[in-house]
Structures are given as C-alpha cells and as structure tokens.
Image: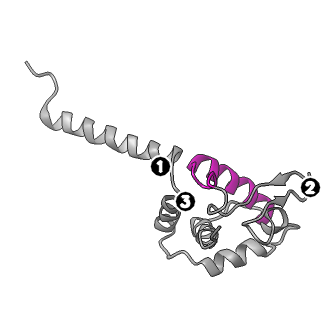
Amino acid sequence: MNLISKPLSLAIVIGAAAIFINMRAAYAAAPAELLSGYTSRSGTLASSARGREFFTSKHGHEWSCASCHGAVPTQSGEHAATGKTILPLAPAVNAERFTDAAKSEKWFRRNCNDVAGRECTAAEKADILAWLLMFKP
C-alpha cells in the first residue's frame, strides 16, 4: 500500500526544489544574478547613472560609499575610520565581489546604515550593482 498519494509526493518534490533554489540563491550567486534579483524585487529597471550618483553622494551622514571604497571602484579603497585597506568593489577586478548573496546583503546592510542611516532599498542595490558591473578590468 502506498502511504503517500501522488499529489502529496509531487507537492513534496516541488517544495524541496523550491527550497534548493532559494538556498542556492542565498549562498552562491553571480553578480548578474544578484542584480536580477534586486531588479525583480524593486519592480523597476536598474540605472547605472543612479548607482553612480548614490555611490558618490552623501545621504545626510558624514560618509558616502566612495569615502571608503574610493571614487574609482576598480582600485582599492581605505576605510575612513580604521584606515584598513578595502579591496576593489567592481566584480571585474575582484572576482569575489557579489558572489555570495548572504555576504552581499550583510555588507549592504552595514554600509547603507553608515552612509544613509537605513537599509538600502532593492532599487538602490540594483542601481549600485548595475554601475559596478559596467567597469572592465
């Protein structure tokens, strides 16, 4: 006797696949995949011009993103308070950038709080990432 009905079995398989896909998105990604996710959540197209503007501007606080990461994200920056070197932010010259969604979210949360006093929106993250993806080695 089959204890699990076919509809229930199918639901379990579909649910397991959805969990796997969500786990993959949370732990291993390419920068373009992250950009696609942020764009999808924001409901608007990403704008590299808005990303550059956000990155280089102050938002009511002492620092901009460029204060630590540098105005040219293909080069290393320096943390404004600690002086610690920060490796380039542009994925084209630092292949580790934006490949781990959880790590990317952690740093967006911390840095946006420092720069804007709040978490960045999905649209702001998409814009910043769109700008960073424009850089070539």
Q: Could you tell me how far apart the alpha carbons at marks 1 and 3 are, in whole angstroms?
A: 11 Å
Q: Residues within 10 Å of mark 3 (few under 14, many from 20)?
A: many
Residue annotated with mark 1: 25
Q: Residue furthest front?
A: 137
Q: Amino acid under label 1?
A: Ala
Residue 49 to residue 31: above or below: below
Residue annotated with mark 3: 31
Q: Amino acid under label 2?
A: Ala
**Element marked by disc 3:** helix
**Element marked by disc 1:** helix
Q: Amino acid under label 3?
A: Pro
**Element marked by disc 2:** loop
Mark closer to the observer (1, 3): 3
Q: Is residue 16 left or right of residue 130?
A: left
45 or 61, nearer to the observer: 45
Q: Is residue 131 left or right of residue 55?
A: left
CB contact under 8 Å: marks 1 and 3: no
CB contact under 8 Å: marks 1 and 2: no
14 or 48, nearer to the observer: 48
Which coloring applies here? Answer: one colour
Residue annotated with mark 2: 81
Q: Residue furthest left?
A: 1
20 or 1, nearer to the observer: 20
First in sequence: mark 1 vs mark 2: 1
First in sequence: mark 2 vs mark 3: 3
Residue at the image position 67 percent from the left and 49 percent from the top: 106
Residue at the image position 73 percent from the left and 71 percent from the top: 55
First in sequence: mark 1 vs mark 3: 1
Q: Which span of residues is magenta-colored? A: 95-116
Residue at the image position 79 percent from the left and 72 percent from the top: 71
What x and y, as percent, mark residue 96?
63, 51
What x and y, as percent, mark residue 61?
85, 68
